[in-house]
Amino acid sequence: MVPEGFGELGHYRAPALKDIRATTPSFAGRQACADCHTDVPDVLKKGRHVGVGCEACHGALARHADDQEKQKPAKLDPRKLCLTCHTANVAKPKKFPQVDPAEHGEGATCTSCHTAHDPMGASAK
């Protein structure tokens, strides 16, 4: 029952890298998303996330686009997801929106004040 390689490097299973490399993510593409989620492209056109592809945040969803019952997208945690790109870092361009999570938002989720697809737009709370 214990997978091969488990415990050799603590709880990390070294052969997992080979397993992961063997899988190919299957992307649907922005148009496939827009075909069903018709409200989002108009919001994106006006927002700062216009150049960010849907699957950059939501993950590879070709199976979901083919059959919505086959794969449900994971529920996103905005506080973690948004900070992936927007945590303050001196290596990022100064014009890129950055926050110090300890000082910004008082621990609230990002979407309690911002709209994900247009974070600085009129739809922001």
Image (cartoon, helix red, strand yellow):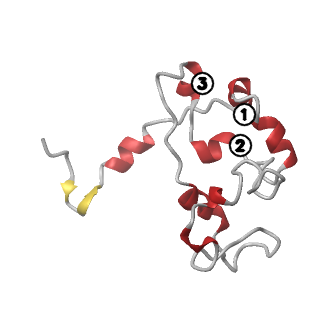
Q: Residue at x 79, y 50 (%)?
A: 123
**Residue 49 placement (x, y as % from top left):** 77, 51
Q: Quadrant of residue 45?
A: top right
**Front-most of 45 and 108?**
108
Residue labelled with disc 3? 65
- Separation (CA) of disc 2 from disc 1: 6 Å
Residue labelled with disc 2? 53
Tell me the element at label 2. Answer: loop
- Which three-letter amino acid code belongs to the residue tagged 2? Gly
Q: Are marks 2 and 1 in contact (CB under 8 Å)?
A: yes
Q: Quadrant of the N terminus?
A: top left
In the rendered image, the vertical position of residue 4 relative to residue 25, given as above or below: below
Residue labelled with disc 1? 30
- The mark nearer the N terminus, 2 or 3, is 2
118 sits to left or right of 2: right
Tell me the element at label 3. Answer: helix
